[in-house]
Every structure is written in structure tokens, then in C-alpha cells.
Amino acid sequence: MRVPIADFLVLSGILFAIGTAGVLVRRNALLIFMSVELQLNAVNLTLVAFSRMRNELNGQVLAFFSMVVAAAEVVVGLAIIVSMYRRRGSVNVDDASVLRG
Amino acid sequence: MLDLIWLVPALPLAGAAINLFFGKRLGKAAGALAAAVMTAAFVIAVFVVAELLKLPAEQRAHVRHLWEWIASGSFRVGVDLLVDPLSATMILVVTGVGTLIHIYSIGYMDGDPRYGRFFSYLNLFVFFMLMLVLAQNYLLLYLGWEGVGLCSYLLIGFWYERASAANAAKKAFITTRIGDTGMMIGIALIFVKLGTLDFGQVLGPGAGRLSEGAATAIALLLFAGAVGKSAQFPLHVWLPDAMEGPTPVSALIHAATMVTAGVYLVARSHALFEASTVALPIVLVVGLATALYAALASIGQFDIKRALAYSTMSQLGFMFFAAGMGYYAGAMLLLVCHAFYKALLFLSAGSVMHGTGDEADMRNMGGLAREMPATTAAFTVGALALAGIPPLAGFFAKDHIVSFAATSGRDLAWVLASVGAFLSALYITRPVFMAFFGTRRAEGHAHESPPVMTVPLALLAVGAVGAGVLGLSVAGGFLARFLEPSVGTAAEGAVGPSEAVLVGISVALAILAVAVAWYVWGSGRVDWLGIPERHPGLAGALGTAFYINALYSWLVQFPGKGFGRLVARGDEQVIDGMVNDVGAGVERLSRVAPRWETGRVRSYALSFAVGAFAVLVVLGLRL
Amino acid sequence: MIPAPHLDFLPLLPELIVAGVAVALLVGGALVGRPSQTVLLLLTLAGLIAAAAASAYLWNWDGPGRVLGEMIQADRLAVVSRMILLGVGAFGALYGHHYFARTGVARMEFYPLLLLAVSGMTLLVASADLIVVFLALEILSLALYILVALSFRMASAEASMKYFLLGAFSSAFFLYGLAMAYGAAGTTKIDGIALALSGRTGSQPLALAAVGLLLIGFGFKVSVVPFHMWTPDVYQGAPTSVTAFMAAGTKVAAFTALIRVLDVSFQPLTWDWRPAVWALAAASMVLGSLLAIAQTDLKRLLGYSSIAHAGFILTGLIATDGAGIAAVTFYLVAYSVTVLGAFGTVMLASGGIRERTSFDSFRGLAGRSPMLAGLLTLFLLSLAGIPPTVGFIAKAGVFGSAIRAGFWPLALIGVLASVVGAFFYLRVIVLMYMEEPQAELEPEGAALPGAALALAAGLTLVLGVFPQIILPVLEKAAILRW
């Protein structure tokens, strides 16, 4: 069965939107970060779909690039969140408002 | 020799730099150094102008290209200095009067903890002022324009320990900034329409290519800058407050040079103003209105420097009035003469303050003539010159302008200008009688100032007496002929009364004003000190003192109380209030913002997401 | 037999040197234990200078325009931007040396992180492919997230977390834009996209989505309204030395890459993206200037000023000709010099690590330290765009470009925003010169950052009076080969 390309794009768009919504509604820094990961994976799906559409591999290589970058982001991000947790005892981002206008 | 023109601004700049970095170490030498570079600049300026005079009249415009400032695409601006009769006149005034004021400051600022800093700012001011008048394109002119504003700001607030000085500095900067913005937009508009900012291009063939609307817009935007810088109504509020600065600053910046930059700008850009049919009439009306308004306000002042500040405003109004009639040579003649006698008046006032322990309230003076004869003589000469008593400088300068109004058929303007001339004579003789004659009204001893201050006074007095020789007749004077290549000749009018009649009326008005001033403030027959108590309704209002004066009384009562209050306290309440409200409004607006600037990541992300959506929608519209 | 691809690493040499020194410092530092800060600083500066030399050599590069599988651009824009960035890095190192020397704990990881951030920035300006742009953005961002956290203050950790979460969020948008570009053009090469798009007519939803999403991603990095909200918080929370580095470096790197993306890749869609860029520029100039008025902390104020400046730079970008690009690069030089000077002065005047950056600490600074007050005045005047400082020439350049391209209303908004801007910069000057000191804070004198400040001040003035020293170079660099 061949699924039309538009379906993949719509699905990834929905995933990206869910990720965006997650960033907006979650209070836990870790969950916000996971929502960002969901967005990134939605993009990966788009890349692979376009790759298939064009019958070439470049898009899939790009997806691997993005996975590696995401992994690096996790390393740094977790370190930052953990250090925040150690200082404050909470990963709730609404608590972090020392800096404000 | 003409190519050495760059030395004229370069010397004060060097002086400013040396005093800025080594001012403390130089100690007393700082003032001498600053005065020395000014003298050198003046001497070079004299030689340059002498060289210019040797050329035939039509060739008297020399451009010295120093370096390419900006050359990016079609946007080319050079650091080019223009020596022509107009700029030559200005540099002589700036360096000449500037030198005397620098010398005077050596004595006046003696003992100030920031002595070196003061001279550094003062030299820097002269540098920017010279750049302003020597610039050969609008961008370089704008550099000088902003620079003098900055120095003015620094010098008004020089004694920043006094809150009033700091506030005055701020007010001056913000108020003039309003005009400057208009001017900047005007310059941008010149570039948009003509693709160049070069005077040779813009004022030569360029002005003719502009449409009526574009020329009007450009001229009025430039004039907005002039209105701010030259303290014309309605942007004049900063000038009286600017008197918080040291007196030499008031003399140099807020009387002789910087405030005249607006007049210079109009004279320089006259081709643009003439390309529009409404621009010059507006200049005329604004100038005349300010001349009258400020003259009235000056009569109500008790602070000697504030009285002089309103007087400056009024005189600048006369200059714009002349320029508005297309009589640029007349405006420039008044500019030159005014530089002499107003600097003289301010420096004399400074000498009074120096000798009486910083007393500026004329109610506490009186009878200073005995203790300060030299200062008294100087102030009196300056006042008579301003009043238009022949054959002093002010007589020729002001009389030409008033006569020109009559002979060019502007009868109403002529009447109003005559009234203004009468008021000028009145307001300027008033401090003479109040401060120097009669008896001393306060405790304390006054002493004459040292020669380093009185000698510059004497030299300025010579100028105030003799500068009239530059323009002995309305159109045929030396200055008018000299300036002809720059500003053209004003059409000689043939209507109205003959020149002899006009001169007679003018002189009679001046003498009448002096007599009135003597009667009220000098004869002792009027208890002018007691007027505030006798009229408690207007107590505190500065206008009370001249309630006796028939003319003023009529002016105040006829249009009703509101106008009286406007004249007496117009600046402090009506216009200040407006300026403050605008400022407060902007601040309130910016306070709303922190409500969504909550410091929370999620609200930031929300702003981001909404913005992202908006960007995509804007792009989606292109589908 | 597989033919070995020809790999020309020379155009990548600056990045290799910088990243190499960074790794060497990390490894070496771990082996030595507690290396001397001064040695670390010298090695860092040596690396930056070597990279600058390599970069300068590339000015006359006559090899292929793109190397390493057409991933790396070897043009003069890359050379010029690299030089600026390496200079910014050197300033950052000098400031950091001063700042962290006082913490008591040897912050040895500062130098490698700084170098890694620099390598990301320089890679960004030399990218010939969107995926390299993405990688470079991540390299510099990941290093910056940690640099921001390198202080023991609570604010520092908070700033880092905010920056990180929002940065990751914006990366997702950028990557989505990259995917859309790939879908629209079948390639992610910067010039390849232009070639693929130029022949087409009719509506191009994927390409429009691509340019929009990329604009959003860049918008975050250069702090354009409405993606700006992290800026004041992060600028205030980060160690001042790091703020100085990131304020200048991120703008130079991201704007240079944005020039390539907008003026090359999406050049065929110029008329489509211009309205969006117009709106972003106007919003940034206006809001950045207005919001700054209510600030009471100098670092926050400079944060808002940075937002307004992002708007000014976008104004120049809207004219897509060579002169416009030259004006933008000149603005980047001007902004870097000025903002490095401003933050450097703030660092010295606010007690370094103690970070007393509220307005109260600057009251009467002129009395305590006339030198610092004078320097800060100069830098603020340049930020306000008052002649004869470099900031004035920069503003005249970008507004001129916008006017030439017919966008005079935008230039007018810019002029008015500058007027508002002058007001709040002036307020700081008033504080320093015309108010009584409140805080008992002894400004620090320091030789190394002092020399850096003198250099910044000199450049601010000299480039304001003689911009022709570098303008011809920038104009040569503005010719994009594709």
C-alpha cells in the first residue's frame, strides 16, 4: 500500500504542534524538554518522507544529523536542569523567575 | 592659505583632547592652553578670510576635501570644508568672540574643581560649532549640530551638584532633540529626492528639481531643527533654564554662537526655502512671534541671566524674521552684531555675579556702578547697542530689518517689528537701571573683576560699538555685498516711507523706551519693588513688575487673564506641562510591558509561538 | 575501486585550529590538574591569532568557491566575518580572564567552551549548506548554554535554563524550516535552493514555510521581536564577560548566515519574505527602544538595546544588494566593537563577579572613576548613533540602504526609534555625571581588560571618523559568489 506524501506531512505537522503545545503547557523542565524532542522527531519524519518522495537518501542522512544533535542537546540540557534542581530543589520552570523586567 | 582651513577646527579639537586627558595635571595652564588654541584658530581664520577677500567675488567658494567619510554605493559623503562668505563670517564670529570668552573664563572659572574639564568641553564645543558652519554637506553639518548639542548639554549641567542644573541640561537635550529629529528626517528626505547631500548639488541645481511639496517638506523639517536649536517658539523652553550653566557658557553657546546655528541653517539652505512658497512666510511668522513674545517675557524677569536669555530668544526671532523676508544679509548682520553685544552683556552679568558672590537676582542689586565701574560701563554699552541707539552696532542691524519690512510692503510686520524693537530697548535698559544705578538693596560688598575678565569686556564693547560699520545701509553695506555670492541680494523695496523717516521712527522708539525704562526703574518715582505685594493676585508671577507700563498693561488686560498668565509663566506651566506629559506618556507605555515580561519561560515560549504563527501567516498571505 | 573524494580542508582551517586548541585545552587541563589561568589565556589567544592568520590567508583563496562536498563556503564574506568573530573571541577571553580570576576557583573550562563557541560561530559564517548552518548554530548554542551558567549566582543558572529551553524550542523550528527547504528544493545547499526555486512560477507553499521557519529560528538567535524575550534575562543573568561575548558574537554569526539564507537561497522569493522581515524589523526597533525606557538595570537595558539593534540590522538586510550587505557587515563590526566596550566597562564598574549592575551602582560613577564613566559615555553614544562615533555611520548605512531600496517608512521608524533610544542612553549618562553616588563600590582598574577597552574606544572613534578604513574591504566581501 502506498501512503500519499501529504499524509506524512500532516502527521508530522500534528506531532510538531503537539510538541509545541507541550512546551507551552508543561511546567516541568524535563517534560518541556521532552516536548521539544517530540518536535525534533516530527521534523525527522518530514525529512524521511521527503527523502522517500524524491527517491534519494539525502533526507535520511539529514535525519541522522538531527538525531546526533538532539543527543548532544540532551547531554547539555540534562546537565543544566540537574544543576538547577540541585540549587533550587525543583524543576518547575514557573519557579524560575528571579530575572524579570 | 585657504587649504589651511582645516587647522581652524583642528586646533580647538586638539585643545579639547589635551585638556580632557591632562587637564588635572595642567592645573592653571589648562585655561591658558584653551585660550591659546582659540587665539591661534582666530588668527588663521583671519588669514583665510583675507585670502578669500583677494579672490573675485564670484570665485569666493573654496572646498577643501579632507577625506572620504562614507562611500558606500551611491551614498558618498566627504569630510569637505567649505569656505565662502557665509561660512567665513561665521568662523570669524565663532573664533573671535570665542577667544574672548575663553580668556574671560580663565578668570571666571578660577578655583573650580573641574577647571580643566570645563575648558575641554568649551574647546570641544568650538570644534563642533566650526564643523557645523564649515561643513560642505548636510551630514557633516548634522555632525556639528549633534556635537554642539552634546557640548551644550554637558556645559549646562556642568555644576551637576545642583539638581536644577542637571534638570536644565536634560530639558535642553530633550527639547532640542525634538527639532533635531525633524531635521534628520529632512536630511534623509533630501537624500531620497536628490540622491546627494552635497551643498553644491543640493542648493545649486537640486533645489530647482524639487517639487513644491517636497521642497516645503524639506524646508520645514530643516526649520524644525532650527526652531529647536535657536530656541524659537514653541521649542524655546529650554533656553531660560540653560542659564544654570556657567555664565561664559551662556555667553558663548546660548547667546553668541550655537543658538544662531538655526539662522545659519536657514541662510545656508535658502535655495530650498525659496523653492517652496510657504516655507519662508512660516519662518517669518515664527520669528516675529518669538521676537515679541520673548521681549515681553524678558521684562518680567528678575534673574539677570534669565532676562538676557529671553532677550536672546527675542533677537533670534528678529533674525528669523529677517530671513523669512528673504533678507538674509540683514539676518547675518544682526547675528554678527548680536554676538558682540550679547556676549558682552552676558559676560558683564557674569562679572556682576563674580563680584557679588553669585548674586543673580536684580532685586538684590542696585548701585553697583560705584563698586564695579568697568563692568557697569560694559553692560551699559551692550544694552545701548541692543536697544538700537545710534551709532552703536545694534542700531544698524535692527533698523535695517525693520526698515526692510516697511519698504518691502509688509506693513503689519513693520508695525509689529517696531513694537518688538521698542520692547527690546525697554527690557534691556531695565536691568541697567535695576542693577547698576540707584542704591544697593542688599547687604554685602561688591568688587570689580580682575583684568583677565575686564579686558575681554572692553574688546567686546569695541565690537558692540563698531560692528555697525559692516552694514551702513539696508542693501549696500559691506557685509551684504560680501555675502552676496552666498545668499544673493534681497530685492530692494521701493514702497513705504523713505529711509530717513523710518530711521527717525526707529530712533525715537528706542529713545522713548530708554526714557520709559528710566522713569520706571531708574528715577525712583515708581516703587517697582513693592508691586508684587500690592498685587497679590499676580504675586509670584514675573509680569507684575511692569504692570505700570502702559503698553504692557494693555497687552495683559485686553486679551484677558489667560494670556497674561501665558506671557508671564507660559514656559513654566503651559509648555513645560506639555513636554512633561509627552514624556510621562511614553514612560507609562513602557511600564505596561513588564506585565507580560513575567520572567516565566512558558510565557516567553507563548510569545515565541504566537510570533511564529504570525510570521507564517504573513508569509502565507503571499500564496 | 572507489575513487577517493578530493577533500580540501584549507578553507576550514580556522575552525580546525580553534576547535583543536579547545580540545587540547580540555585534555591538557584534565592532565595537568590546576593549570594557570594566564597560561590558558595565552594559549587561547594564540589559537585565535593562528586562526585569524589562516583566515586572512583565505582572502586571496583562488580554489573552488565551495569545498568539502560543497558544505563550506570559501568566500570573502566568510573571511571578514571570521575575523570579526575571532576578535570578539579574543575580547571574550580577556574579559573572562579578569572575571573568573576573582572567583577563587579556577574556571579552566571557560576557555575551551569559549573556543568551541567561537568555532561554532565561525563555522556558521562559512556554511554553504543549511545542515552545516544547523550544526554550527548548535555548536555555538550548546557552548553558550554552559557559559551562561558559569557563575555561582542563582540568576546565572536560571538564565542558562531559560536560554536552553527556549533555544532548543527555536532549534526545532529551524530544523523544520530546513526540512521544508529540502522538500521544496530537493537540496539543502544554500545556492542549490536558489537554483531550484528560481525557475518556478506559481505558489510555493513549502518554500514559503521554509523561509518563515528559518526566519523564526534565526530570529531567536539574533533576538528579534517577538522571539526576543529571553534576551534581557539571559544578558542580565550571565556573567558579564560572557554576556559581552555572546551579545557581539551571536549577532555577527547569525546575521551573516541570515544574509546567505535570505539573499542567496531565498533570493527568488525576495518579494515574499520582505513584508515579514519588514514587520520583524519595525517591531524590534520600536519595542526594543520603548521597553528599554522602564529598565533599572544596565545589563537588562543593554539587552533591550540589543533587541532594537537587531531591528536596525534587519532594516539594512531588507535591501538585498551588495551595498546593503556591506552596510549590514559594517553595522555588525560597529555593534561588536561598541557592545564589547559597553559590557566591558560595565564589568569593571560593577565590581566584576559581584555584578552590581543596577542603575544605583552607576550613580555618580564619573566622580569615582572618570575614565570608566567617559568610556561608557562614548559607547552609549555610539549605541545611540550620535556622530562622530561608529554607531552613527552604521545607522546611516543601514537606513540609507533601506531608503535606496524604497523602504523609507521603515527607515523613518528606525530614525524615530533611535530618538527614543537616545533618551534612555542619555539617562545612564545623566546618572553617571549628574547624580550623587549611592553605592560604595570601588571600580576596578585592570590592565588587560583596560587595554581591550582602550582598543574598543579607539575603534569606536576612529571607525566613526574614518569608516573608509574598512568599508572598501567590506564592499569586496559583500559580493556573494553563487
Image (cartoon, rainbow, N blue to C red):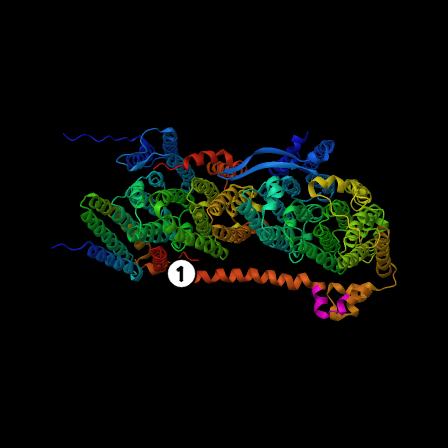
- Image quadrant where residue B301 sits: bottom right
Outermost residue toward the left? A1
B141 over B364 or under it: above or below: above
Q: Is residue B163 left or right of residue C176?
A: right
Give the image location of residue C387, x and y in percent: 56, 43
Give the image location of residue C60, x and y in percent: 38, 28
**For residue B344: magenta?**
no
User: What's the residue at 51%, 35% (across, down)?
Assistant: C468
C95 over B284 or under it: above or below: above
**For residue B559: magenta?**
yes
Look at the image and tell me in which quarter the N terminus of chain B lies.
Answer: top right
Say whether residue C436 is visible.
Answer: no
- Image quadrant where residue C265 sits: top left
Give the image location of residue B169, x and y in percent: 62, 52
Q: Amino acid at mark 1?
A: Thr
- Chain of the residue on which disc 1 is drawn: B
Q: Which residue is label 1 attached to?
A: B598
Point out the stretch of residues depicted in magenta.
B555-566
Look at the image and tell me in which quarter the C terminus of chain B lies.
Answer: bottom left
Say whether residue B66 is visible.
Answer: yes
- Secondary structure mostly seen in the magenta stretch: helix
Q: Is residue A82 left or right of residue B406?
A: left
What element does badge 1 sit on?
Answer: loop
Q: Is residue C157 left or right of residue B365?
A: left
Q: Residues within 10 Å of mark 1 (few under 14, many from 20)?
A: some
Q: Nearer the viewer, residue B59 or B250?
A: B59
